[in-house]
Amino acid sequence: MPLYAYHCDDCDHDFEKLVRLSDPNSNTPECPGCQSRKTRKRLSTIAAISSGQSQSAGDCVSSGPFR
């Protein structure tokens, strides 16, 4: 299931939601703040490493329990 970022036009709330493509409400999910359906997808960015770049172990920063 893809994770999408949304914006509510009624209460100006930004939120993220995992959306099943088979969900009939996937185009207009309900806002968790005000339960409005006047929501729209936001443009979001992704992090990617191209095949031309190399990454060494020192480049990775861990913030969790695994180091």
Image: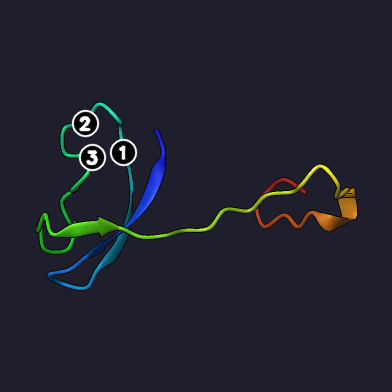
Density class for disc 2 (Cα within 10 Å; few <14, some 14-19, many ≥20) is few
Residue with the mark numbered 3: 26
x and y percentages locating residue 23 in the rendered image? 21, 31
11 lies left or right of 52: left
Closer to us: 14 or 53: 53
Query: Residue 19 lies in what quarter of the image?
Result: top left
Lateral position of residue 62 relative to residue 5, left or right: right
Residue at point 85% right, 50% down? Answer: 53
Colour option used: rainbow
Secondary element under disc 2, as helix, strand or loop, is: loop
- Residue 33 percent across, percent down from the top left: 17, 63
Q: Quadrant of the N terminus?
A: top left
Element carrying mark 3: loop
Q: Where is mark 2, residue-wise?
A: 23
Residue type at the position of mark 2:
Asp
Residue occupying image coordinates x 11% and y 63%: 34
Relative horizontal placement of residue 7, taking residue 24 as reference (left or right):
right
Determine whether label 3 and label 2 are within 8 Å by CB.
Answer: yes
Mark 3 nearby-residue class (10 Å; few <14, some 14–19, many ≥20): some
Contact flag, marks 1 and 2 (Cβ < 8 Å): yes
Identify the amino acid type marked 3: Ser
- Residue position marked by numbered label 1 in the rendering: 19
Q: Which amino acid does label 1 sit on?
A: Val
Whole-Å distance between the Cαs marked 3 and 2?
5 Å
Residue in the picture at 86% in, 47% down: 52
Proximity of marks 1 and 3: CB atoms separated by less than 8 Å:
yes
Q: Quadrant of residue 15?
A: bottom left
Question: Which disc is residue 5 wearing?
Answer: none
Place of residue 8 in the rendered image (x, y in percent of width and height, measured from the top left): 20, 64
